Image (cartoon, rainbow, N blue to C red):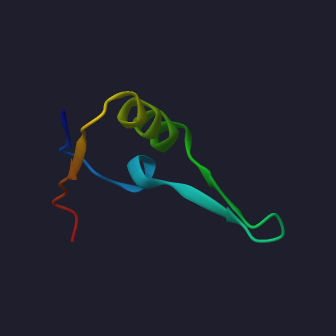
Amino acid sequence: MLIVDDEADYASIGFTVNAPMRSVELSKIAGQINELRNKVADSDYLQVTATP
């Protein structure tokens, strides 16, 4: 499966580093994309943006 994000921005790849807990917390959208990719054996994620 190929997922194409034609408006890639911070929301798509958003995460927060929790240094004291040594963990990374994904944003809502990033987490949902990750869940979808984990359900499919072979998936790729292509992000495209025109933002300079």
Q: Nearer the viewer, residue 15 or 37?
A: 37
Q: Quadrant of the C terminus?
A: bottom left
* Image side of residue 22 versus residue 9, left or right: right
- Residue 29 x/y as whole percent: 47, 38
- Residue 15 x/y as whole percent: 56, 56
Residue located farthest toward the right when viewing the structure as drawn: 20
Q: Quadrant of the N terminus?
A: top left
* Image side of residue 39 versus residue 2, left or right: right
- Residue 30 x/y as whole percent: 46, 44
- Residue 24 x/y as whole percent: 64, 59
Q: Is residue 26 above or below residue 50?
A: above
Q: Is residue 13 above or below residue 52?
A: above
Residue under the point 46% across and 33% down: 35
Count the marks: 0
Residue 36, quarter of picture: top left
Residue under the point 49% across and 54% down: 14
Q: Nearer the viewer, residue 32 or 39?
A: 39
Residue under the point 32% across and 29% down: 40
Q: Is residue 28 above or below residue 17?
A: above
